Image (tube, rainbow, N blue to C red):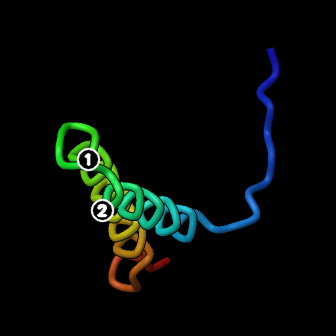
Amino acid sequence: MERRRFKQDTPLDQRLEDHAKRLRNEARGTPPGIRRDDLIRRAKQAETAMRMGEWLKSPGLQSTK
């Protein structure tokens, strides 16, 4: 079975940022409870992934060959 592949138009960090903003906006309109907590948790995860990507791209971590 062959994998379906497609090229992303926007970089991963931008997609993560947009996703986190969408989740936070949705959480604002949701009454307090499990659903809202889940939306906030998922937004934090996306923001953490974004920061990790920035950290991994930092000049101090680049290999010197």
Q: Is residue 60 above or below residue 44?
A: below
Residue located farthest toward the bottom when viewing the structure as drawn: 59
Residue at image coords 34%, 65%: 47
Q: CA distance from mark 1 to mark 2?
A: 18 Å
Q: Is residue 45 left or right of residue 33?
A: right
Residue name at image x 36 percent, y 62 percent: 24
Dot 1 amino acid type: Arg
Please give the residue where the numbered disc 2 appears in the rendered image.
48
- Crowding at dot 2, Cα within 10 Å, few <14 / some 14-19 / many 20+, comes out as some
Which amino acid type is shown beneath numbered disc 2? Answer: Thr
Specify whether 31 is left or right of 26: left
* Secondary structure category for the residue under label 1: helix
Query: Where is residue 63 shown, x and y percent of the image?
Result: 43, 74
Residue assigned mark 1: 36
| Crowd tier of the residue under label 1, counting other residues whose Cα lies within 10 Å: few below 14, some 14–19, many 20 or above | some
Depicted 26 relative to depicted 17: above or below: above
Position of residue 38 in the picture relative to residue 4 (left or right) = left
Q: Quadrant of the N terminus?
A: top right
Answer with left or right where residue 55 lies relative to residue 31: right
Residue 32 percent across, percent down from the top left: 18, 48
Count of marks overlaid on the render: 2
- Name the residue: 40% across, 75% down: 54
Q: Secondary structure at mark 2?
A: helix
Q: Which residue shows up at 49% across the image and 59% down it?
A: 19
